[in-house]
Image (spheres, coloured by chain):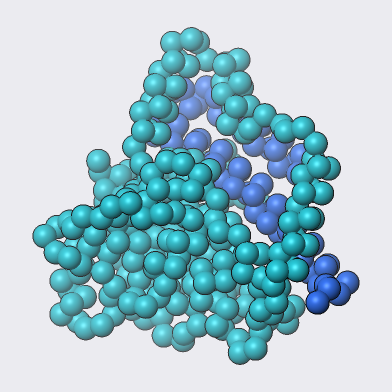
Amino acid sequence: MFGSVFGRNNQSIRLVVGLNQIDKMLPNGWDERLNMPDERAEREIQRRSNDIINRLARYADISASNIEYYSALKRYRLLPLLSKIIRNAYAGFKLDHVQPADPFELADPEVREFAEEQRREREKKRGTREPSAKDRMFDEMKKILSEDELNLILDKFRQERQLPPKVAIFGKAGVGKTTTINSLFNARWKTSHTVVGTTQAQMKEFELSTGGTLNVLDLPGYGRSVSEDREYEKIYQKMIPSCDLVFLIVQANTRDFADDQEMILKVSEWLKDSPQPQR
Amino acid sequence: MALTEAEKQKVGKMLDELDRSKLDMVLASLDAFGKWLSSAAYSIYCKVKDALSSLWRSICDFFS
């Protein structure tokens, strides 16, 4: 079911491609009252998205585990997207406490109320909380490692956690970067400063609703003109190797993926040349 | 307007999916830790790899 570092796939690339705006794939396919696609639309969205995922993966020689479809506007499939981000980012575990915006908040009030009630019941059934996976993991490690080894790991772990995750986000203009950041990371924008001497690329600091900071490198959108793209490519190539993850957003409800395919190919090559973030 | 039975079922199905996705996030985090450990301290990673792998599987089994 899962490609795991403990299993078959230890080679990964710090790239996630998000197919956004899948709610616009089919006219009249979205149930606004429930804020979810109707059954026919859900099947069709899945089928079309998987076709696109296979095309993009084949073209750029990346895995389907680097690509996910979602709608930032409707807050649909944000958790599967976040899982892929955690799995593919360098030290992605630093993002595991992120809580994306709740899709039921956009549903009708009675639907929202029913969902809340169901959640409370499920919570009650689950009963007392299990120790977290991370606690269990350190417990397992304690049984195996010497005190010195364990302290070494804990020191490295703490040092790593002190560095806010740094995610580069880009795509064509109007692809929904801002909505994605707001919905997916449920984060509040704290500060922003210009980098590489241009207002076209900005480092933005976000405060996560669940605590901690996230640094987002907001890169300019490609696909408007050849000369602009050439200029931006220099910025991308300079900035991307320092990031823990590159998140490239693609518009799902289009037929023309040529620019996106080229960009995915280039980014994956740059990341292969720099398998760990250059800090 | 009260929810119909069909709507209630759809909400339940969506909540199931959200629960499954949360499990996947736990597993993704374990994966990410394993990858990070293999790059930060490879010799230690080799020592604990099997134990973490069995923890990973036990979490999968618990939710399956």
Of residue A88 and residue A131, the one placed in the foreground of this image is A131
Residue B36 falls left or right of residue A131: left
What residue do we see at 25% from left, 41% from top?
A279
Eyeballing the image, is A144 above or below A247?
A: above
Residue A127: % across, % down: 80, 36
Eyeballing the image, is A143 above or below A211?
A: above
Q: Which chain is blue?
A: B
Taking the view exactly as shown, the residue that stands out farthest to the left is A197
Colour applied to chain A: cyan
Task: Assign the N terminus of chain B to one quadrant of the image.
Answer: bottom right
Instruction: Tell me, yes or no, if residue B8 can be seen here.
Output: yes
Taking the view exactly as shown, the residue that stands out farthest to the bottom is A27
Taking the view exactly as shown, the residue that stands out farthest to the right is B5
Residue A44 falls left or right of residue A110: left
Of residue A147 and residue A23, the one placed in the foreground of this image is A23
Residue A248: % across, % down: 39, 65
What residue do we see at 17% from left, 74% from top?
A230
Residue A209: % across, % down: 49, 48
